[in-house]
Amino acid sequence: TEKNAVLWAILSAITGIAALYVYYFLMKDFYRHERREDGFLEDLGKALAACGITFIPRRDYQIPNRSFVLYLVITILTLGIFGIYWLYVLIKDPNEHFKYHVIFEDYLLKQLETTV
């Protein structure tokens, strides 16, 4: 669903509860997105194989299904120190995901160009 970034930035600055929702959404959304994308790439690989094009997408890094409650409890128990790592994870996971996009998109284009 579409989220208004300015509204959520203001709500997060005023109250930490909005920030927790954003953390939850980011943790779960990228995990679900990557699983759906993996299914799509698997189907794409099968379709291309039927056309005689080799395409085997292999992801080096998979976004793990992290527990929001566990991260929240550890952040509270460490008086917020774990929150630094939590923020790092929220930044690292999408970056790794999009690095893979560059690799598989380039590979896919090369495979398609050789057949055309």
Image: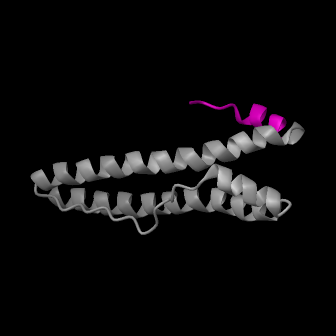
Q: What kind of colouring is applied to the model shown?
A: one colour
Residue at image position (89%, 37%) is 14
The residue shown at (86%, 60%) is 79
Left or right: residue 98 compared with residue 49: right
Magenta span includes 40: no
Quarter of the image with the C terminus is bottom left
* Depicted 40 relative to depicted 104: above or below: above
Residue 111 on image: x %, y %: 23, 61
What predominant SS class does the magenta segment belong to?
A: helix
Camera-side residue of 32 and 54: 32
Which residue appears at 46% of the width and 66% of the height?
A: 61
Which quadrant holds residue 95? bottom right
Magenta highlight on residue 3: yes
Nearest the camera: 18 or 68? 68
Residue 20 placed where, x, y %? 74, 44
* Residue at the image point whose x is 61% and y is 62% from the top: 92
Magenta residues (range): 1-12
Give the residue furthest to the bottom.
Answer: 60
| Left or right of residue 77: residue 22 | left
Q: Residue 54 placed where, x, y %?
A: 18, 62
Q: Viewed as shown, does residue 103 lie left or right of 3?
A: left
Q: Is the N terminus in the top left, top right, bottom left or bottom right quadrant?
A: top right
Displayed quadrant of residue 91:
bottom right
Q: How many marks?
A: 0
Q: Position of residue 63 (x, y in %)?
A: 50, 59
Looking at the image, residue 49 lies above or below residue 13: below
